[in-house]
Amino acid sequence: MQQNGHGLLSDKKGVIFGALNDQSIAWAIAEAAHREGAQFALSNAPVARRLGSVDQLAEQCSSPLIWADATSDDDLQKLFDELKETYGTIDFIVHAIGMGVNVRKDRPYEDLNYDWYLKTLNISAVSLHRIVHHAIASEAMADNGSVVTISYIGAQRIFSKYSEMGDAKALLESIVRSWGYRLGKRGIRINAISQSPTKTTAGSGISGFDAMYDFAEQLSPLGNADAASCADYTVSLLSDFTRAVTMQTLFHDGGFSSMGISDGLVEAMHDVWGKNSDEG
Ligand SMILES: NC(=O)c1ccc[n+]([C@@H]2O[C@H](COP(=O)([O-])OP(=O)(O)OC[C@H]3O[C@@H](n4cnc5c(N)ncnc54)[C@H](O)[C@@H]3O)[C@@H](O)[C@H]2O)c1
């Protein structure tokens, strides 16, 4: 883990969405960005004021805290106006927002409540479109900036318990590409980090999360990537070192996405299913 900063973001200003508590991926990103010398505001939905402890993080990072529902155009317009007043322009945006409403309420994929489904897509994916739209429309975003969002491999492959969130992440990754094409002419890049299962409030809201976590931990040669290492990777994407990387889904998963099966899992399956698994 990086202890001391290297000033990688010392000339950068930005905004980080989605830090709820010290388990949040965005919380770790804020700590790493602060360590690397960035100045940034923090934002979360007004309801998070009651549920989380982001004010503590704001104090730690000397960050203004702007409450905004990422599904509200009014809130986002005000947020970017405020950011302009504070910083002039910003160089980076981190979007680490997600919620699966049907998943949380244990509603199966075959019988989705469509109002909840639309809410899931709105919060978890359309919010990225909305945030970038308002950043550009308000002229708060500087040329050559960087936008990072956090995705999951369930966007591309079926993880049965991930349910509607797979659709939300597929849309999220598509929005990354669609905006990336359009932002390129100003040198602004946008990427998704496809992160390992991570023990956070959003993560543990998924029933079957522990199995997904353990399976990935077993299969990945480097084990699951934790929030702190995701934060270090994010710093690299916000820095000028990655100025020619855009429109990508970048796996940050300890190698999980390149694996099929491992010796450890073959042995574990043998233990569970007996010798039939070798004969079959
Ligand atoms: N935890 C995992 O296993 C994992 C793996 C891959 C990707 N991700 C993604 O990482 C991102 C961050 O999630 P996390 O795991 O750190 O959990 P988290 O619960 O700490 O963060 C989710 C955040 O979304 C915010 N949010 C929800 N609705 C909002 C709204 N309407 N407006 C503004 N903010 C809103 C929450 O308040 C919270 O801060 C999410 O996109 C999640 O899907 C998580």
Image (spheres, rainbow, N blue to C red):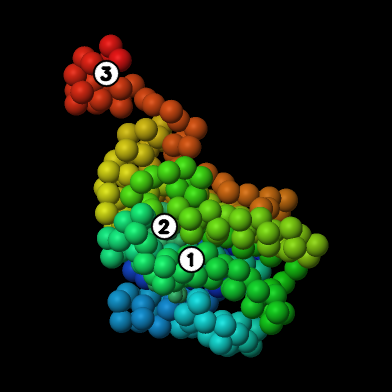
Disc 2 packing (10 Å; few <14; some 14–19; many ≥20): many
Q: CA distance from mark 2 to mark 3?
A: 32 Å
Three-letter amino acid code at the position of disc 3: Ser
Residue designated by label 1:
121
Q: Position of residue 233 (x, y in %)?
A: 53, 51
Residue designated by label 2:
164
Three-letter amino acid code at the position of disc 2: Glu
Q: Secondary structure at mark 2?
A: helix
Would you identify the image quadrant in which residue 213 lies?
Answer: top left
Q: Position of residue 16 (x, y in %)?
A: 51, 70
Q: Label for residue 277?
A: 3
Residue most extreme to the top: 279
Q: Is residue 39 above or below residue 109?
A: below
Quadrant housing the C terminus: top left
Q: Secondary structure at mark 1?
A: helix
Three-letter amino acid code at the position of disc 1: Leu
Going by the image, does 89 lie left or right of 224? right
